[in-house]
Image (cartoon, rainbow, N blue to C red):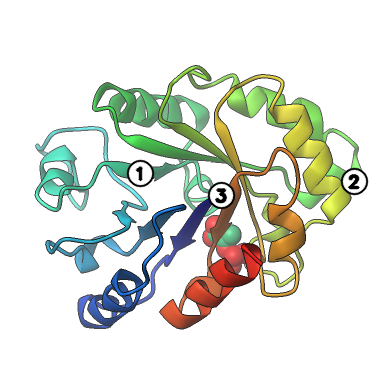
Amino acid sequence: MIFAANLKCNHTRSSFQSYAEEINSFKNTEDEIFIFPSSTSFLMQKLNFYQGAQNFYPCINGAYTGEIGQEHLEEFNIKSVLIGHSERRVLGENEKFLKTKFDFAKNLSYNIIYCIGESLEIKQEKKSLDFLKKQIENIDLDYEKLIIAYEPIYSIGTGVSASIEDIKEKLNFLSQFSKCKFLYGGSVNQDNIKDICSLQNCHGVLIGTAALQADKFLKLIQIAKG
Ligand code: PEP
């Protein structure tokens, strides 16, 4: 399974160092673990998980004030990126820019966790499936290092995850269009992770709040695996 932790704007380099050491001491060769720290916390040491970037600018380097490019990721051997997270979309990353980021990362053969998800309003209007279909039309669904994370906006950081039926319906729907792996993200916790990970078209989870501490993240992995 895939277990991904999005640490968002949390942890300093020093606290992420301790976090990484705890994950490193966990021996697990069956699963893929991705951790996305803030970019000032990237570590150079050997890690037994994929260290990924929450954000990057689609450039090697150059006159892009405040951004980080490929050169900066490569220095930390980072070859995994999150693209399309709703917390970046809300800051203005539109479909055109997300496609540019996707194509850039694809050309570098990076692992891409591409996040999609509808708002509560769209869900209530019963337009979720059309909305999700449009979101995935923006990217190459045959890219072999693509992982799609279905993260309904109303469940991110709210403590209220989507229902199992909703997750099942969306992942079944999405899996018609790509052979890639699918994750669910949105208020995953110790009580729901096992049921979510047991769904047929769910290959893992993307976790924010509940993975902010390494021991809690490891506990979630243990619960998911029974
Ligand atoms: C996320 O940020 O991708 C996320 C799923 O957050 P949370 O687990 O806190 O809902």
**How much space separates mark 3 and mark 2, taking CA atoms?**
18 Å
82 shown above or below 47 = above
> At label 3, which amino acid type do we have?
Ser
Give coordinates of residue 130: x percent, y percent. Answer: 78, 25
Check mark 3 vs ligand 1: CB closer than 8 Å? yes or no.
yes
In what quadrant of the picture does the C terminus appear? bottom right
Count how many numbered circles sit on residues in the image: 3
**How much space separates mark 1 and mark 2, taking CA atoms?**
31 Å
Q: Residue at x 66, y 71 (%)?
A: 189
Q: Secondary structure beneath disc 3?
A: helix
* Disc 1 versus disc 3: nearer the observer: 1
Residue at the spot of label 3:
86
In the image, 61 versus 214, the foreground residue is: 214
Of mark 1 and mark 3, the one earlier in the sequence is 1
Give coordinates of residue 151: x percent, y percent. Answer: 64, 49
Q: Secondary structure beneath disc 1?
A: strand
In the image, 17 versus 101, the foreground residue is: 17
Give coordinates of residue 129: x percent, y percent. Answer: 79, 30
> At label 1, which amino acid type do we have?
Val
> At label 2, which amino acid type do we have?
Gln
Residue at the spot of label 1:
81
Of mark 3 and mark 2, the one earlier in the sequence is 3
In the image, 132 versus 119, the foreground residue is: 132
Residue at the spot of label 2:
124
Check mark 2 vs ligand 1: CB closer than 8 Å? yes or no.
no
**How much space separates mark 1 and mark 3, taking CA atoms?**
14 Å
Q: Which residue is drawn at 31% across and 64% down?
A: 38
